Image (cartoon, grey):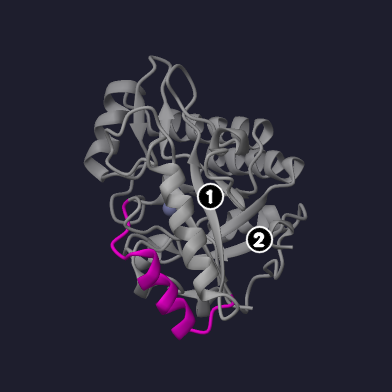
Amino acid sequence: MKANYHTHTTWCDGKSTPRQVADAAIGKGFAVLGFSSHSMLPEDDVGWVLTPEKAPRYAADIRALAAECAPRLRILCGVEADYVPGPGGATPDRAAYSSVAPDYVIGSIHFVVASDGARVPVDHSPGQLADGIRDHFGGSAEAFVRAYFAQERDMVGRFDFDILGHPDLVRKFNARHPYFDEQADWYREEIERTADAIAASGKVVEVNTGAISRGWLDDAYPSAAFRRLLRVRGTHFILSSDAHSADAIDCAFDRFADAEEYLAAPAWLS
Ligand SMILES: [Zn+2]
Ligand SMILES: [Zn+2]
């Protein structure tokens, strides 16, 4: 069954409208297409926030499209919800998105909150990341990466969501702008501890090809090594493209579809 549950559109930072993405999915023989507009955050200083005013309009738009496309394509209305700890932050909790009544919630981390309260963006640009590590983590990439995984372990244990989004997003710039060693003992220890927390939570993990379509990495999130740690702990996976345009909805799916085992029918689909 061809499916993608991680899809952005013009409702947030995607380039295509929901209808353009649905047409592409029908053309490519998809059975299921899940939309996952970005988060509710208090301020729209990043330009892609599902504000309280936009959220119900987003849901109504996706539900109307779902009615039109059924039964050729099953369309689901989800959200990609941020975990930003601290005052004025955001939680990937189903209850926080009641105005959308989402079919499923993806929990993701795009900002690591430092001990001084600063929000350091993980994946905006190599320059912003370097500045954030210098200004808020004492110049230590290891401290930043460890804080990212600690925040992720906290997230999977505490909140009511369905899919863990891009579990090692900290790797995004590490191939083209290396800033830490993925073979280091401390890194292996972090992903092992995080795999334990994910397995204990029972969350589904996405194998996300978004960094391949955007030319940053030649592998998915999570890495092959991280996937092995999760697989032996019994974690279930889905395959997702994190598409920001209609043509990318199945980017590199052929590279992973045979090698990994994916849930054909996640619980939220029934
Ligand atoms: Zn994301
Ligand atoms: Zn996304």
Mark pair 2, 1: CA separation: 11 Å
Label 2 CA crowd tier, 10 Å (few <14, some 14–19, many 20+): many
Q: Do the residues labelled 2 and 1 touch (CB within 8 Å)?
A: no
Determine if the magenta segment contains residue 27.
Answer: yes
Magenta residue check for 40 = no
Q: In the figure, 233 relative to 50: above or below?
A: below
- Picture layout, residue 62 above or below residue 129: below
Question: Which amino acid lies under the numbered mark 1 shown in the image of this protein?
Answer: Gly
The answer to which of 23 and 107 lies nearer the viewer is 23
Give me the disc on residue 188. Answer: none
Residue 250 position, x and y percent, is 46, 74
When asked about the image quadrant of residue 249, the answer is bottom left
- Residue nearest the viewer, comparing 67 with 228: 67
Residue ID for mark 2 = 237
- Say which residue appears at 67% left-offset and 45% top-offset: 195
- Position in image of residue 178 (x %, y %): 33, 48
Placement of the C terminus among the 4 image quadrants:
bottom right
Q: Is label 1 in a helix, a strand or a loop?
A: loop
- Which residue occupies 29% across, 37% down? 129
**SS assignment at label 2:** strand
Q: Position of residue 267 (x, y in %)?
A: 74, 58
**Which mark is on residue 165?**
1
Above or below, 235 against 140 in this view is: below
What segment is highlighted magenta in the picture? 13-31
* The one of 35 and 2 positioned closer to us in this rendering: 35
- Whether disc 1's CB lies below 8 Å from ligand 1 is answered yes
Q: Can residue 220 be seen by looking at this rendering?
A: no
Task: First in sequence, mark 2 or 1: give its number.
Answer: 1
Tell me what residue is drawn at x 35 percent, y 56 percent.
175
Give percent across and percent down for residue 83: 50, 33
Residue kind at label 2, given as amino acid type: Phe
